[in-house]
Amino acid sequence: MLVKLNINYKEYSLDIDPSTPLLWVLRDHLNLVGTKYGCGVAACGACVVHMDGEAVRSCVTKIQRAVGKKIVTIEGLSEDGNHPLQKAWKEVDVPQCGYCHSGQIMSAAVLLREIPNPTDEDIDNAMSGNICRCGTYIRIRKAIKLAAEFQKGKI
Protein backbone atom coordinates (compact mmCIF):
# COMPACT_ATOMS: atom_id res chain seq x y z
CA MET A 1 0.00 0.00 0.00
CA LEU A 2 1.31 3.47 -0.86
CA VAL A 3 1.75 5.55 2.29
CA LYS A 4 2.56 9.27 2.23
CA LEU A 5 4.52 10.64 5.16
CA ASN A 6 5.97 13.97 6.25
CA ILE A 7 9.23 13.28 8.07
CA ASN A 8 11.68 16.01 9.02
CA TYR A 9 9.81 18.47 6.78
CA LYS A 10 10.13 16.28 3.68
CA GLU A 11 7.42 14.32 1.90
CA TYR A 12 7.90 10.60 1.31
CA SER A 13 5.77 8.06 -0.55
CA LEU A 14 6.48 4.48 0.46
CA ASP A 15 4.97 1.22 -0.66
CA ILE A 16 4.73 -0.41 2.75
CA ASP A 17 2.41 -2.36 5.01
CA PRO A 18 0.53 0.31 7.05
CA SER A 19 0.89 -1.80 10.21
CA THR A 20 4.70 -1.50 10.08
CA PRO A 21 6.07 0.30 13.16
CA LEU A 22 7.29 3.82 12.45
CA LEU A 23 10.70 2.98 13.93
CA TRP A 24 11.43 0.43 11.21
CA VAL A 25 10.27 2.76 8.46
CA LEU A 26 12.64 5.43 9.76
CA ARG A 27 15.61 3.12 10.19
CA ASP A 28 15.20 0.51 7.45
CA HIS A 29 13.44 2.42 4.67
CA LEU A 30 14.65 6.01 5.13
CA ASN A 31 18.05 5.37 6.74
CA LEU A 32 17.25 7.75 9.61
CA VAL A 33 19.15 5.75 12.20
CA GLY A 34 19.36 8.33 14.99
CA THR A 35 16.16 6.92 16.47
CA LYS A 36 17.12 3.76 18.32
CA TYR A 37 15.47 0.43 19.00
CA GLY A 38 15.61 -0.28 22.70
CA CYS A 39 12.86 -2.58 23.91
CA GLY A 40 10.10 -2.80 21.29
CA VAL A 41 7.33 -2.35 23.89
CA ALA A 42 7.43 1.43 24.54
CA ALA A 43 9.08 0.99 27.95
CA CYS A 44 12.53 2.55 27.51
CA GLY A 45 12.15 5.75 25.43
CA ALA A 46 15.08 5.16 23.06
CA CYS A 47 12.74 5.41 20.08
CA VAL A 48 11.00 8.70 20.91
CA VAL A 49 10.14 10.96 17.97
CA HIS A 50 7.71 13.84 17.64
CA MET A 51 4.36 13.39 15.94
CA ASP A 52 2.62 16.73 15.49
CA GLY A 53 4.80 18.03 18.32
CA GLU A 54 4.05 15.27 20.81
CA ALA A 55 6.55 12.67 21.99
CA VAL A 56 5.61 9.18 20.76
CA ARG A 57 7.30 5.80 20.98
CA SER A 58 8.02 4.90 17.39
CA CYS A 59 8.56 1.21 18.16
CA VAL A 60 4.82 0.75 18.81
CA THR A 61 3.41 3.50 16.55
CA LYS A 62 2.05 1.95 13.38
CA ILE A 63 2.86 3.87 10.22
CA GLN A 64 -0.86 4.23 9.42
CA ARG A 65 -1.13 6.50 12.49
CA ALA A 66 1.62 8.76 11.08
CA VAL A 67 -0.17 9.48 7.79
CA GLY A 68 -1.13 13.15 7.63
CA LYS A 69 1.04 14.01 10.65
CA LYS A 70 4.35 15.84 10.89
CA ILE A 71 7.05 13.50 12.17
CA VAL A 72 10.34 14.89 13.49
CA THR A 73 13.27 12.67 14.42
CA ILE A 74 16.53 13.62 16.11
CA GLU A 75 17.94 14.30 12.63
CA GLY A 76 15.19 16.88 12.05
CA LEU A 77 15.40 18.61 15.42
CA SER A 78 18.03 21.01 14.08
CA GLU A 79 19.57 21.36 10.64
CA ASP A 80 23.03 21.92 12.06
CA GLY A 81 22.88 20.05 15.39
CA ASN A 82 22.65 23.37 17.17
CA HIS A 83 19.35 22.94 19.03
CA PRO A 84 19.66 24.22 22.63
CA LEU A 85 19.35 20.66 23.94
CA GLN A 86 22.01 19.34 21.57
CA LYS A 87 24.33 22.19 22.59
CA ALA A 88 23.64 21.55 26.28
CA TRP A 89 24.15 17.78 25.90
CA LYS A 90 27.63 18.50 24.50
CA GLU A 91 28.44 21.20 27.05
CA VAL A 92 27.52 18.99 30.02
CA ASP A 93 29.03 15.89 28.36
CA VAL A 94 25.85 13.92 29.07
CA PRO A 95 26.30 10.71 27.06
CA GLN A 96 28.25 7.83 28.39
CA CYS A 97 27.38 5.11 25.88
CA GLY A 98 24.96 7.51 24.15
CA TYR A 99 22.45 4.91 23.00
CA CYS A 100 19.39 6.38 24.73
CA HIS A 101 20.14 10.02 24.14
CA SER A 102 18.26 10.72 20.93
CA GLY A 103 15.11 9.61 22.75
CA GLN A 104 16.12 11.59 25.84
CA ILE A 105 16.63 14.75 23.79
CA MET A 106 13.37 14.33 21.90
CA SER A 107 11.44 13.90 25.18
CA ALA A 108 13.23 16.89 26.70
CA ALA A 109 12.36 19.05 23.67
CA VAL A 110 8.65 18.53 24.32
CA LEU A 111 9.19 19.34 28.00
CA LEU A 112 10.97 22.62 27.22
CA ARG A 113 8.31 23.62 24.71
CA GLU A 114 5.59 23.06 27.32
CA ILE A 115 7.53 24.24 30.40
CA PRO A 116 10.32 26.64 29.36
CA ASN A 117 11.72 26.88 32.91
CA PRO A 118 11.27 23.39 34.37
CA THR A 119 11.88 22.47 38.00
CA ASP A 120 13.67 19.28 39.03
CA GLU A 121 10.25 17.73 39.60
CA ASP A 122 9.05 18.79 36.13
CA ILE A 123 12.14 17.23 34.58
CA ASP A 124 11.85 14.03 36.59
CA ASN A 125 8.17 13.66 35.67
CA ALA A 126 8.69 14.38 31.97
CA MET A 127 11.75 12.14 31.67
CA SER A 128 10.57 9.25 33.85
CA GLY A 129 9.75 7.10 30.82
CA ASN A 130 13.26 7.36 29.40
CA ILE A 131 15.74 4.81 30.70
CA CYS A 132 19.49 5.40 30.70
CA ARG A 133 21.35 2.19 31.49
CA CYS A 134 24.49 4.21 32.22
CA GLY A 135 22.67 6.27 34.85
CA THR A 136 23.44 9.73 33.49
CA TYR A 137 20.25 11.17 34.99
CA ILE A 138 22.00 13.93 36.98
CA ARG A 139 23.78 15.15 33.82
CA ILE A 140 20.53 14.89 31.82
CA ARG A 141 18.76 17.13 34.36
CA LYS A 142 21.68 19.58 34.31
CA ALA A 143 21.67 19.69 30.50
CA ILE A 144 17.90 20.31 30.35
CA LYS A 145 18.29 23.25 32.74
CA LEU A 146 21.19 24.58 30.66
CA ALA A 147 19.14 24.22 27.46
CA ALA A 148 16.34 26.22 29.12
CA GLU A 149 18.87 29.00 29.73
CA PHE A 150 20.08 28.78 26.11
CA GLN A 151 16.47 29.08 24.92
CA LYS A 152 15.94 32.19 27.02
CA GLY A 153 19.11 33.70 25.55
CA LYS A 154 20.69 34.04 28.99
CA ILE A 155 23.79 32.14 27.88
Image (tube, rainbow, N blue to C red):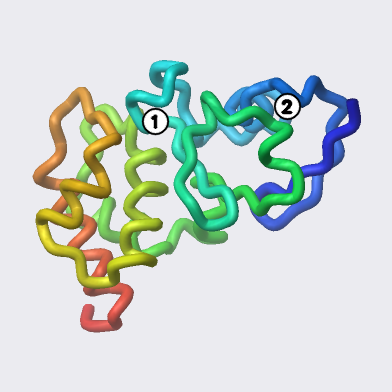
Q: Amino acid at mark 1?
A: Ala
Q: Nearer the viewer, residue 69 or 153?
A: 69
| Residue at the front extreme, as displayed | 65
Please rate how many residues cluster around mark 1, counting C-alpha atoms within 10 Å: few if below 14, some from 14 to 19, many from 20. many
Q: Give the residue number, with chain letter if any, for mark 2.
A: 29
Q: Amino acid at mark 2?
A: His
Q: Name the residue located 75 percent from the left edge and 50 percent from the top edge.
A: 68
Q: Name the residue located 21 percent from the left edge and 44 percent from the top edge.
A: 94
Secondary-structure class at tag 1: loop
| Whether residue 155 is situated above or below residue 102 in the rendered picture | below
Q: Quadrant of residue 52?
A: bottom right
Q: Position of residue 98 (x, y in %)?
A: 31, 32
Q: Position of residue 110 (x, y in %)?
A: 39, 57
Q: Position of residue 32 (x, y in %)?
A: 61, 35
In contact (CB < 8 Å): disc 2 and disc 1: no
Q: Name the residue located 62 percent from the left edge and 48 percent from the top edge.
A: 71
Please rate how many residues cluster around mark 2, counting C-alpha atoms within 10 Å: few if below 14, some from 14 to 19, many from 20. few
Q: Position of residue 16 (x, y in %)?
A: 82, 23
Q: Quadrant of residue 3?
A: top right
Q: Quadrant of residue 145?
A: bottom left
- What label sits on residue 46 in the rendered view? 1
Image quadrant containing the N terminus: top right
Image quadrant containing the C terminus: bottom left
Q: Name the residue located 66 percent from the left edge and 53 percent from the top edge.
A: 70
Mark toward the viewer: 2 or 1: 1
| Whether residue 109 is situated above or below residue 39 in the rendered picture | below
Q: Is residue 100 left or right of residue 143?
A: right
Mark 2 or 1 closer to N-term?
2
Secondary-structure class at tag 2: helix
